[in-house]
Image (cartoon, helix red, strand yellow):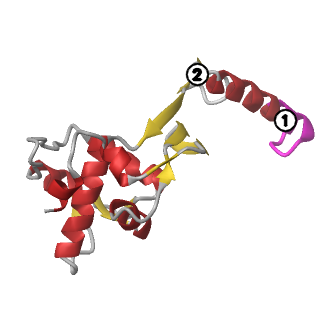
Amino acid sequence: MPLNDPIVQFSIARVRAWLNSVLVSGNSTHCPVCDRHTQRYRRSINSSMAFVLVKLVRHFERHPKTKWLHVPNFLEGVKASSGFVATRSQGDWAKLRFWGLIEERDDIRVGYWRPTQAGIDFADGVSVEPRYAYVINNSVVEWSDEKTDIYAALGNKFSYRDICS
């Protein structure tokens, strides 16, 4: 049967509905269609992610001719006054792409990123973002109604003023 057959479409819709009900309830499962483990993750902009975003935005402000930055290398040398050191193994910052706050270079060079205008606005404290992104298979499927700003995202772990200096 072709994929556009009404019976196939009905079956796919039923599997999607079932899968969504399992995932929304907070459970994970094995997808009978793609044969992969599937889980719905609730992601938030944590303090480390907010810290990296502010550092990136400030770096691009100080180096306006820079078009892209190899973030893993950049983070190796970044330290906050609190002693936090971002390393290659702390890759949560890349999840900022879910909110559209950073974008990755789309050519063969891996690891090159830059903040978007939305990322700059969020880092500057002039905009808010959904507090949670609900993610399945690395794609956002839902946003929370609750909002957050850069100060709430940084929490008590970092001082915005210290990061910006």
Left or right position of 147 against 48: right
The residue shown at (73%, 32%) is 16
Coordinates of residue 40 in the picture (x, y in percent): 55, 30
Mark 2, mark 1: which one is toward the viewer? Answer: 2
Residue range (magenta): 1-11
What amino acid does circle 2 point to? Gly
Coordinates of residue 2 in the picture (x, y in percent): 83, 42
Left or right position of 126 against 37: left
Whether residue 104 is visible, yes or no, is no
Residue labelled with disc 1: 8
- Give the label on residue 97, or none: none
Q: Is residue 32 above or below residue 143?
A: above
Residue labelled with disc 2: 26
Coordinates of residue 7 in the picture (x, y in percent): 90, 34
Residue 136 picture quarter: top right
Coordinates of residue 133 in the picture (x, y in percent): 52, 42
Whether residue 121 is visible, yes or no, is yes
How crowded pointer 2 is (Cα within 10 Å; few <14, some 14-19, many 20+) is rated as: few
**Farthest residue toward the right?**
6
- Residue 44 forms part of the magenta stretch: no
Can you say which quadrant of the picture contains the N terminus?
A: top right
Q: Nearer the viewer, residue 2 or 140?
A: 140
Residue 105 picture quarter: bottom left
Q: Nearer the viewer, residue 134 or 36?
A: 134
What amino acid does circle 1 point to? Val
Q: Dot 1: what SS?
A: helix
- Residue 6 forms part of the magenta stretch: yes
The residue shown at (26%, 39%) is 156
Q: Nearer the viewer, residue 114 or 126?
A: 126
Of pointers 2 and 1, the one earlier in the residue sequence: 1
